[in-house]
Image: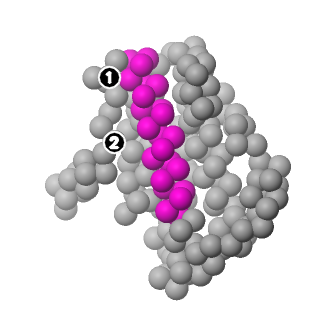
């Protein structure tokens, strides 16, 4: 459920963000990653990093503040692809796989190991944390009334209505 919620919430924040000019999107507003564009890039960077760790590929040298896409349209396409890949990955996992430890190295090279379900919990919580920053930045730029509802309950109610 959290992978699908994550994709839903990202789609909503990106739809609102699309109303901003490139200048407003890139404006440093003092957020953890400066701008809304920086924040959205950070989330894509970290999702790619965690996906690579889960898939067993190396991501040494990853900078958490990397700007993968300066163009919002390109960033949005990349985000949609990442969300689709994450949903497919999670939905294809067995309970046994989720319980298995994931061994990986942090971005500073420190070896870690923890159950995969804990890693995924972190990944989705991290998305929610920084998407909250993005939500605030959208509200500052467009007005709070244009910031989309991202609550998990709103997502759950929307899928219940669709069913």
How crowded pointer 2 is (Cα within 10 Å; few <14, some 14-19, many 20+) is rated as: many
Would you say residue 148 is visible in this rendering?
yes
Instruction: Kindly check if marks 2 and 1 are in contact, taking CB atoms under 8 A apart as contact.
Output: no
- Left or right: residue 32 versus residue 66 is left
**Mark 2 or 1 closer to N-term?**
1
**Where's the C terminus, which quadrant?**
bottom left
Q: Secondary structure at mark 1?
A: helix
Does the stretch in magenta take in 131?
Answer: yes
Residue 150 has which mark? 2
Would you say residue 84 is visible in this rendering?
no
Q: Residue at x 77, y 67 (%)?
A: 111
Q: Position of residue 152 (x, y in %)?
A: 31, 51
Q: Secondary structure at mark 2?
A: loop
Task: Give the camera-side residue of 69 and 114.
Answer: 114
Alpha-carbon span between mark 2 and mark 1: 13 Å
Q: Residue at x 60, y 52 (%)?
A: 47
Above-or-below relation of 64 to 113: above
Above-or-below relation of 15 to 29: below
Above-or-below relation of 149 to 22: below
The residue where tag 1 is placed is 144
Does the stretch in magenta take in 4?
Answer: no
Q: Which residues are magenta?
A: 120-142
Q: Position of residue 151 (x, y in %)?
A: 30, 45
Q: Position of residue 54 (x, y in %)?
A: 65, 68
Residue 162 has which mark? none
How crowded pointer 1 is (Cα within 10 Å; few <14, some 14-19, many 20+) is rated as: few
- Left or right: residue 37 versus residue 111 is left
**Magenta region, main secondary structure:** helix
Quarter residue 89 falls in: bottom right
Above-or-below relation of 35 to 14: above
């Amino acid at each position: 459920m959290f992978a699908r919620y994550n994709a839903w919430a990202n789609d909503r924040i990106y739809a609102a963000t699309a109303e901003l000019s490139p200048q407003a999107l890139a404006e440093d507003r003092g957020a953890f990653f400066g701008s809304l564009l920086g924040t959205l890039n950070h989330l894509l960077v970290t999702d790619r990093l965690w996906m690579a760790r889960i898939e067993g590929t190396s991501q040494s040298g990853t900078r958490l503040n990397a700007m993968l896409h300066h163009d919002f349209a390109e960033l949005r396409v990349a985000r949609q692809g990442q969300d689709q890949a994450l949903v497919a990955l999670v939905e294809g996992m067995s309970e046994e796989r989720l319980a298995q430890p994931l061994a990986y190295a942090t971005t500073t090279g420190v070896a870690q190991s923890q159950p995969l379900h804990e890693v995924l919990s972190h990944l989705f919580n991290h998305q929610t944390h920084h998407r909250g920053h993005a939500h605030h930045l959208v509200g500052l730029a467009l007005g709070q009334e244009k910031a989309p509802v991202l609550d998990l309950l709103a997502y759950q109610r929307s899928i219940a209505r669709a069913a």
